[in-house]
Amino acid sequence: MTTLPKTVTDKANTGNREALSRWLGEWTSDQMLRRAVVDEHLKGSDGAVSPPGAGGAACGFAPVEGQIILLPPISAAFEVGRPLYVLVLKQTSGPFLVAPFSPFASPATDSEWQTGLSAKPLRVLCFWNVREMSAHALSAGWLSSCLPLRKHAQVLKTYERCRRRGRG
C-alpha cells in the first residue's frame, strides 16, 4: 500500500474550516426546519397568525435609520417564508435601504458581518442582500429595537467598505 506524503496544516485554514463547519451545521438545521414547516403548511395546520399590517393597514410607526424591524414571512421585498429581521441602514431619495439579518450565528461570506449583538436572530447582517423598501412595507412589520447611534455608525461604515469592494 502506498503512503501519501504528510501535509502541513495551515492554522488559519483550520479556523476557516471550523467556522464553515459551524455555519454548515446551522444551515442543515435550518433546511430541516423549513421542510417541516412546509410539510405542516401543506397539511393545513400551520397555525399562522396574520401579521400586523396585513391587508395594507400600517402598524403606526414611521421607519427611521437604525431601527430593527421584524417583517412578516412574506413581505414586499423578501419572500423567505419565515419572519425576517431587517436593519434600516439609511433613507435614500424615498425608500429606505435595509439589510436583513442572517438566521445563522456565523457569517458565511465576507459580505456578512458579525454584529456583536447578543440576541440570536441579530448576530449577523447580510450586506450582500441589501435592498430598498418603502416606509409602508416596513411599517407592516413589528418595530423590534433601535441600534445605538455609535453602533449604527459602525454598521454604515462596514456596509460602505463592503459595497466599495463590490460585495454589498
Image: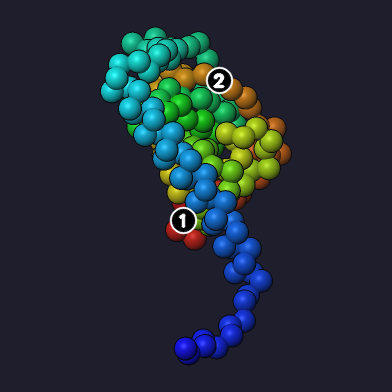
Q: Residue at x 33, y 22 (%)?
A: 41
Q: Which residue is mark 2?
A: 143
Disc 1 designates what residue?
Answer: 167
Q: Does residue 75 appear left or right of residue 11 in this picture?
A: left
126 in relation to 55, above or below: below
Q: Position of residue 125 (x, y in %)?
A: 55, 42
Local packing at callout 1 (Cα closer than 10 Å; few below 14, some 14-19, many 20+) is some
In front of the other: 166 or 110 = 110
| Quadrant of the rendered image containing residue 150 | top right
Name the residue: 41% across, 40% down. Answer: 31
Label whose residue precedes the other's in the sequence (1 or 2) = 2
Nearer to me, 148 or 18:
18
Amino acid type of disc 2? Leu
What SS does tag 2 mark? strand
Which sits in the foreground, 43 or 138?
A: 43
The residue shown at (42%, 28%) is 82
Q: Give the camera-side residue of 23 and 59.
A: 23
Q: Does residue 162 appear in the picture of this structure?
A: no
How far across and down, in percent of the image, does residue 101 sit?
Answer: 52, 38
Residue 130, located in which quarter of the rendered image?
top left
> Is any part of residue 98 visible from this angle?
yes
Taking the image as shown, residue 8 lies to the left or right of residue 135, namely right
The circle on residue 75 is: none
The amino acid at mark 1 is Arg
Q: Residue furthest left?
A: 42
